[in-house]
Image: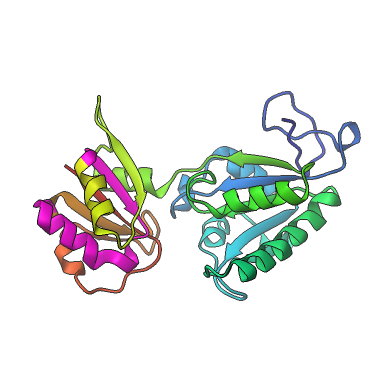
Amino acid sequence: MSEYAASGTRSGGAGQPANRAESSATGTLYGLGVGPGDPELLTVKAFRILKQSPVIAYPRKKSGAQSYALKIAETYVDTTAKEMLGLTFPMTKDREALEKSWNKTVDAVWEHLAAGRDVAFLTEGDPMLYSTFIHMMRFLKQRHPEAKTVSVPGISSVNASASRLGIPLADGDERIAIVPATDDYGAVREAIEEHDCVVFIKVAKVIDLMLQVLGDLGLTDKAAVLTKVTSAEESVWLDVRELQGRQLEYLTLMVVRK
């Protein structure tokens, strides 16, 4: 797949800018993984595309809300020199509301792409791992099959947490799972029992249930919880008993290593 960037220069390697005069006038949507929180964990490729893309799109929960992904990238971007496109993604399961919101979002992005402008869509972690970009890419392709999209990998909070804790996620023939935490006791217990290591994401709303499962399995001392890992706002709990009944931020995960 050809890739295009705002500089208008050509390079033969994959992911390099292409000359618009020699290609379609349509811009490229880049899913840009900006890492887990520490700006120094941004990749060189993501840095290059940030600099070259005239439009920077970033997700937020509601209009005017702060974007965690943008906060990471702002270290390297002069927001006054870019077209900043804040995209609102409401936290709801109402299908009608979601469809209306996604149609509006796709229209906003396509307006720039159709005019030949590349759009760098920021996402914390990796764009292909539980990311808003996955849905952005899917909806854009449904409405505009000709749209060009490119995913630029980023360091996920899963990898960052292992490094922060100094523990391996998997070694040799060990099995690892990355699981969205739910209020299903049986599913949580099964995931732990069947794997050597489990990283549970989105644990904030079910932390008490998670602690119950760990206690029943005798694995409370084998778990750690991290919020906004590697960022200036990072919190780490090595004794997860302290979290009983606590309110945690959305970007919180739990690592269970047997």
Number of numbered discs present?
0
Q: Nearer the viewer, residue 90 or 71?
A: 90
Please tell me in which quadrant of the rendered image residue 108 appears. bottom right
Q: Nearer the viewer, residue 223 or 12?
A: 223
Residue furthest to the left: 218
Q: Quadrant of the C terminus?
A: top left
Residue 73: give x, y in percent of width and height.
Answer: 56, 55
Residue 40 appears in the picture as rendered: yes
22 relative position to 70: left or right: right
Residue at (33%, 60%) from the top-left corner?
182
Which contiguous range is marked in magenta?
194-219
Residue at (32%, 41%) from the top-left corner?
177
Residue at (19%, 52%) from the top-left corner?
223
Q: Nearer the viewer, residue 62 or 50?
A: 62
Residue 84 appears in the picture as rendered: no
Residue at (61%, 76%) from the top-left corner?
64
Residue 170: give x, y in percent of width and height.
Answer: 27, 33
Q: Quadrant of the N terminus?
A: top right
Residue 48: give x, y in percent of width and height.
Answer: 64, 42
142 relative position to 165: left or right: right
89 relative position to 112: left or right: left
Please tell me in which quadrant of the rendered image residue 228 appears. bottom left
139 in the magenta segment: no
211 in the magenta segment: yes
The colour scheme is: rainbow
Residue 168: give x, y in percent of width and height.
Answer: 25, 37
